Image (cartoon, helix red, strand yellow):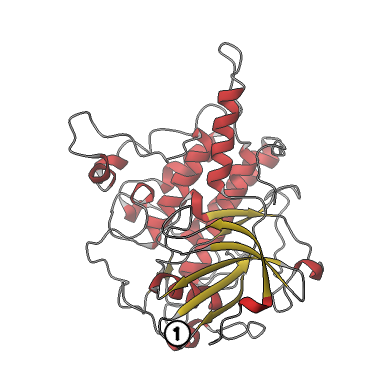
Amino acid sequence: MARMDPYRMERTYGRPEERPKISQCNLEHLFIKQKTLDEGEGRGPGALNQGVYVVKHRKSGVRCVYKKIVEDKFLEREILFLQVLRHPNIVNYVDAFITEQRPKELGLYMEFCDCGSLQDLINKYVSYNKEHPPPQNGPQELIPESFIWHVFHSLANALQYLHHGICAGDHRDPPEPATRHIWPIILHRDIKPDNIFFRTERGQNDRALCYPHWPLQRFNPTPTERPSSYPKVVLADFGVATAKNEPDFEPNGEIIGTSIWQPPEIPEWTARGEVWVIAAVCLSLCRLLPRGPIKPPPPDYRGSVVWNETADARKGIRDMGTGPAYSQQMEDLMWECLRFNMSNRPLSYELVVMIRKAEVETIREQQIPIQPLPPWALKQG
């Protein structure tokens, strides 16, 4: 994967004024290490990193996640993207350094998401149902529909920003995408439950929780979007992201990202392909599928890894359905997003409008209750 030009990124997308430039000096002396999330060497959720830690800023006391690595183009790419991106559903950049000496040291400081990942949530529901089996023919514990709408809407908001430069809170119908000249499309290319996190919702004036130069986002959700008890949904890990003006934007036959979370046109990545992925993620929430909705290979197939990289593995996902516990509106909308032919899927800014209308129909008009998550569902701290 080619290295990116940091100056081109800043010229193209702009760097928020309150954010510091990438330091050329190691910043570890400004933070206190509190917890190890991944010791590195390919272990744990951050396999591209040599270490992932929870740290506390010495001056402000704010906790951050710190990724540390030596000579790595993936973390460098993530730093360059997060420094210019600013959206309530994308992980917030705090600070970063890329040293000049060889071997080059890289460090990225991001907001700490204190409620775990979407993968953690699915795993907790699966474990709970195993430990507390329902009575005969009784329903198992399922994720509330209102929460799945919250996740679906949040991810669609993140995508319409990455793809079209549309900020959250734009309730025009339809919203107006920026021109490609002003906002060249950005593709994440590794959307999956492990890279979707939850954090406590922060008040606009709660600066005690904010690093001094963090932007305070102004996002006014409609009443149907979520109750205040739901955590913020945050998309993270931009280590394999690309943009329209980058040399690796066009597909070259290489599998980029995680194969079981890729659309039928694998290995090609497109904006409509990422819409397919977030629908597959939400379908996995409905069906409680920790490894996603891709069906297992036939018994005589030559290997599961090869099978995961085929379009055939995605056939039938669209007909799986959300299950009887969820509304027809949710199933219909996922059905639209999971179309096998990508040209028939909506774009992300169209999807945001579709979700908004469907939420009104289900939550407000059909009186589907907005249910809180059970206390055991989310990781704490």
- Of residue 97 and residue 140, the one placed in the foreground of this image is 97
Give x and y (percent) for residue 331.
49, 37
Q: Position of residue 69 (x, y in %)?
A: 47, 70
Q: Is residue 87 visible?
A: no
Residue at 49% from the left image edge and 33% from the top image edge: 287
The amino acid on which the numbered mark 1 sits, given as a three-letter code, is: Pro
Where, quadrant-wise, is the N terminus in this rendering? Answer: bottom left
Instruction: Please tell me whether residue 47 is drawn above or below residue 32 in the rendered image.
Output: above
Residue farthest to the top, as pictured: 136
Image coordinates for residue 126, horizontal then vertical, percent: 54, 31
For image coordinates 41% across by 70% down, the residue present is: 74
Instruction: State the image quarter where residue 321 is shown.
Output: top left
Residue sitting nearer the eye, 45 or 85: 45
Q: Is residue 320 above or below residue 186?
A: above
Q: Is residue 9 visible?
A: yes
Number of callouts: 1
Q: Seen in the image, is 72 located left or right of residue 134?
A: left
Above or below for 153 versus 291: below
Whether residue 209 is situated above or below residue 45 in the rendered picture: below
Horizontal and vertical percent position of residue 114 = 67, 54
Judging by the rendered image, the residue that carries numbered circle 1 is 6
Q: Residue 316's quadrant in the figure?
A: top left
In the figure, is residue 237 to the left or right of 131?
A: left
Point 30% across, 78% down: residue? 247
Q: Is residue 171 left or right of residue 155?
A: right
Residue at position x 37%, y 38% from top?
A: 317
User: Looking at the rendering, which quadrant does residue 210 occupy?
Assistant: bottom right
SS for tag 1? helix
**Crowd tier of the residue under label 1, counting other residues whose Cα lies within 10 Å: few below 14, some 14–19, many 20 or above:** some
Q: Of 100 and 91, which appears nearest the observer? A: 100
